[in-house]
Image: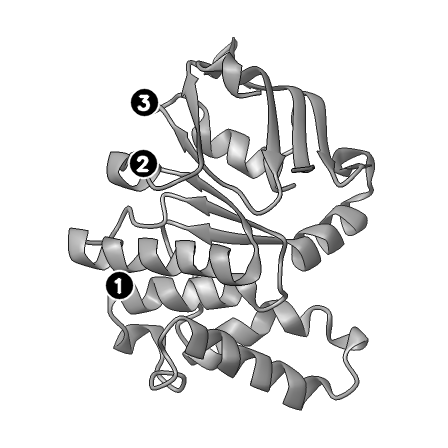
Amino acid sequence: MSDILVGQDVCKTYKGDGKKVKAVDGVTIRLKKSRSVAIIGPSGAGKSTLLHILGGLDKPTSGHIVLDGIDIYKLADKGRAEIRNKRVGFVFQFYHLLPEFTALENVMMPAMMKKSEIRNPKFEIREKAKKALTSVGLDNRINHRPGELSGGESQRVAIARSIINEPEILLCDEPTGNLDSKTSESVYELLFGLKERIGLTLVIVTHDEQLSRKTDDIIHLKDGHLDNPGFI
């Protein structure tokens, strides 16, 4: 099985109060197509920082992130943003839904950024958003605003938004951190169901041991270091 995303000797250093802190320190990992991976470790281990670097959101101090042969941090900001929009989806602990828009309108937004590629953008994007919401079980909530949705429903909207552009990689940062155990389980089932149906590479930062046991692979981070080097 081929690599889809490679992080090579990745470091991220933050400076503050006259000190340097290495949030990520020399991490090398290889992510396989259509595999699920959990990134686990104690608070402050660098999990979220690594995820953001892998997704093109946070430039590493040193090292390389290579997506299908493209070193994404050698691209200009515009080129990296295009790759994020087309090939990578993001799900965060906090849903980041715009409260004044309906679930349907929130889901449509990433596709609106690439509407120039679509022949009939308004109709086609709306239909894709409906399909995405149906795939996460919310076809009856498309016209509800975030304030009218439960936490689990809001996270499902966020997941639908993350897959509307049919990404190859879905990066999730504590996707069930705000949810109760029952709702968390339904989100797990949704994420792994999507992985199987559309062949996503699924990467999840989590403190939830139950969730990590469901993944194909586990990456352990401790103090910014890879704690299971046999994984790479």
Front-most of 200 and 174?
A: 200
Q: Position of residue 49 (x, y in %)?
A: 51, 31
Graded by Cα atoms within 10 Å as few (under 14), some (14 to 19) or many (20 or more), the crowding at tag 1 reads some
- Asked if marks 3 and 1 touch (Cβ < 8 Å), the reply is no
Could you tell me which residue is drawn at 69 percent across and 68 percent down? 113
Protein image colouring = one colour
Graded by Cα atoms within 10 Å as few (under 14), some (14 to 19) or many (20 or more), the crowding at tag 3 reads few
Residue linked to disc 3: 42
Which three-letter amino acid code belongs to the residue tagged 1? Answer: Gly
Give the position of the N terminus as an image quadrant: top right
Front-most of 222 and 3?
A: 3
Residue linked to disc 1: 151
From the viewer's perspective, is the residue at label 1 or at label 2 nearer? 2
Which three-letter amino acid code belongs to the residue tagged 3? Answer: Pro
**Image vertical order of residue 1 relative to residue 150, above or below:** above
Which three-letter amino acid code belongs to the residue tagged 2? Answer: Arg
The alpha-carbon separation of the residues under discs 1 and 2 comes to 24 Å
Could you tell me which residue is drawn at 67 percent across and 58 percent down? 85
Local SS, label 2? loop
Residue linked to disc 2: 213
Local SS, label 3? loop
Q: Where is residue 182 in the image (x, y as percent from the top left)?
A: 17, 57
Sequence order check: which comes first, mark 1 or mark 2?
A: 1
Asked which quadrant contains residue 75, the reply is top right
- Asked if marks 2 and 3 touch (Cβ < 8 Å), the reply is no
Is 162 on the left-hand or right-hand side of 155?
Answer: right
Local SS, label 1? helix
Total number of numbered discs in the rendering: 3
From the viewer's perspective, is the residue at label 2 or at label 3 nearer? 2
Asked which quadrant contains residue 14, the reply is top right
Is 178 on the left-hand or right-hand side of 86?
Answer: left
Sequence order check: which comes first, mark 3 or mark 1?
A: 3
